[in-house]
Image: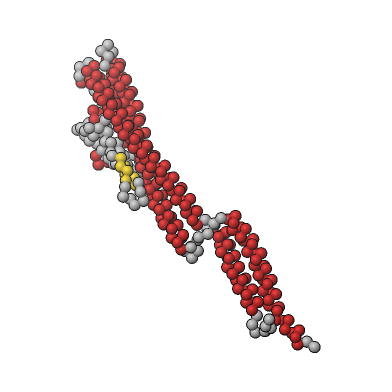
Amino acid sequence: MNFSVNTNVGAFVALQNLSQTNRALEVTQNRINTGLKVASTKDDSATYAIAQQLRADLGGLSAVKASLDRAQSTLDVAVSAAESISDILNQMKEKATAASDEGLDNASRVALQDDFNTLIDQIDSYLKSASFNDSNILIGGPNGDSIKALLDTDATETLNVANRDLTGANGALNAFIDRTNATAPLQKVDWSEDGDGVAGAKTSAQDVNDAIEAMKKELSELGSASRRLTAQQTFVAKLSDTIEAGIGNLVDADLAKESARLQALQTKQQLGLQALAIANQAPQSILSLFQN
């Protein structure tokens, strides 16, 4: 064993071990503070790069979800309006059928006509109110819209719901449109223009029957589109959760393990300090060689 006051090998070794313990302790404390075992590329470049790519995918899915939610809201408004219009048509059928009774007195037929026209006004109101985010798929013309929603993060695939144009030339409500004024409300009826009004009421009853049949198809199309949107929303939500869980598996720290490691490193640090103190006292033993 060499005795030297210039070189204390034991102290060097103790200091190196203590420095290594301090670095490990710093890493553990950082993991506890952030909850991440890979907080930056310095921790693990490959894992960090993978996690960043997954975070980008998650951000893209968030945009897809927002697009689907917006489309679903627009479609929900349209479905609600279309269902309400269908209900109104059923009431109109009752009014027109009752007015077709040849034994009905004129005053009662006029009252039924007024009710019939009031229901037409309600339909017109529903059509104009079926808008979400300035988008209305139930009317055509310059204000008519279709629904488009993103389906993937590359924005290459979209889900489209065509404009239904219920008031168009081939629309479900075609029989009640005033073709002389495109901006006017739906056209009201005047059964008295045709004699006693019976023939006019029967014509309206047939028009309503045609509208009811046409609305069945429209409701079917809207319902199908709504179910597809809902299914896509569910898929995107599940995919987002899966990716988020995958990111967590890659970068999240196991705090139970880190807590145990912290206790061990703190103990090791204290022992390292004691070892360094002991090593620093070793050169003093040389003084005993020079005592008389």
Residue projecting furthest to the top: 103
Q: Nearer the viewer, residue 235 or 91?
A: 235
How is the protein colored in the picture?
A: secondary structure
Q: Is residue 119 visible?
A: no
Q: Residue at x 27, y 29 (%)?
A: 214
State which quarter of the image contains the N terminus: bottom right
Which residue is depicted at the point 43% across and 60% down?
49
* Residue that lies at the very extreme toward the front in this rendered image: 1
Q: Quadrant of residue 168?
A: top left
Q: Position of residue 101 (x, y in %)?
A: 27, 14
| 6 is higher (above) or lower (below) than 45 | below
| Rendered view: 88 above or below 247 | above
Q: Could you say which is closer to the camera, residue 188 or residue 166?
A: 166
- Single out the residue that lies furthest toward the right: 292
Expressed as whole percent of the image width and height from the top left, the position of residue 260 reads 62, 58
- 34 over 190 or under it: above or below: below
43 displayed left or right of 8: left
Q: Residue at x 35, y 30 (%)?
A: 84
Q: What residue is drawn where x is 30% and y is 42%?
A: 160
Q: Is residue 131 left or right of residue 4?
A: left
For residue 260, side relative to residue 37 (left or right): right
Side of 52 where 182 appears, left or right:
left
Q: Quadrant of the C terminus?
A: bottom right
